[in-house]
Image: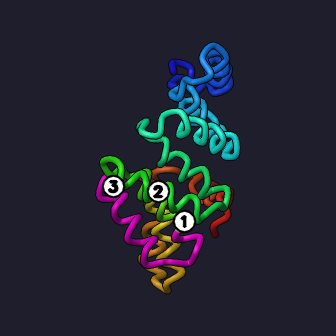
Amino acid sequence: MAYLRKREYDRATDAFDQAIRLNPNYGEAFANRAGAYLKQNDFARAAQDYDEAIRLKPNLDGVWSGRCWSRAILGELQAALEDCNKALQSGPANAATYDSRGLIYLKTGELGAAIADYNSALRIDPKLASALYGRGLAKLKQGDKAGGNIDMAAAKAIQGSIGDDFTRYGVR
C-alpha cells in the first residue's frame, strides 16, 4: 500500500503479487492490485483482480465499484451497470460509483440518466473532473452547448488531460 500511495505502481503490483503468492485467498491483495492496475490504465487486469476479490470477499469495500469502472471502460456495459447497482445497494453512495454509472449511461446514449448520475456524483464531490466532463458531454449531446462547454471547461481546469481520458474510454 505504501508503494501505491507513492504512485510506484510497478513496485506496488510486485508487492501484491508476493502477498497473493503467500496467501492466494487474500481478497484485499487482489482488490489493492486491481487498484494499482487501474492507475496504470490496465483495465482488463484490474477487472480480473476485482473478479477474484469479489469471489473471495464480496463485501469488501470498493470492489463492486472498482469492477464497475473497469468494465465500463472495457465496454462490458451491462455487466458494469449490474456492478454499479450492486455497489449502490450494498453500501453508502460514493461519487466514484455514480461517476462510473454516468459513464455507462453516456456510452449507451441514456443522456438523462447520465446527467442525473453525474449530478449525484458532483453533489458528493463537486470537483470530480470526470463527472463534470461527462456531464458536459451529455449536455452537448442533448443540444445544450453552453452548459456542456461550461462543464467541460471546469473539468479541464481541474484536470487538464480529462479530454484525453474520455477519448481513451471510447467517448467523444
**What residue do we see at 53% from left, 40% from top?**
54
Of discs 1 and 2, which sits in the foreground? 2
**Residue nearest the observer in this picture, 103 or 88:** 88
The CA distance from mark 1 to mark 2 is 9 Å
* Sequence-earlier tag: 3 or 2: 2
The CA distance from mark 3 to mark 2 is 20 Å
**First to last magenta residue range:** 105-128
Give coordinates of residue 153: x percent, y percent: 48, 64
**Location of mark 3 (residue):** 126
**Location of mark 2 (residue):** 84
Give coordinates of residue 40: x percent, y percent: 66, 38
**What residue do we see at 60% from left, 42% from top?**
51
The CA distance from mark 3 to mark 1 is 20 Å
Is 126 colored magenta in this rendering? yes
Residue contact between numbered discs 3 and 1, judged by CB atoms under 8 Å: no
**Location of mark 1 (residue):** 104
Give coordinates of residue 10: x percent, y percent: 68, 25
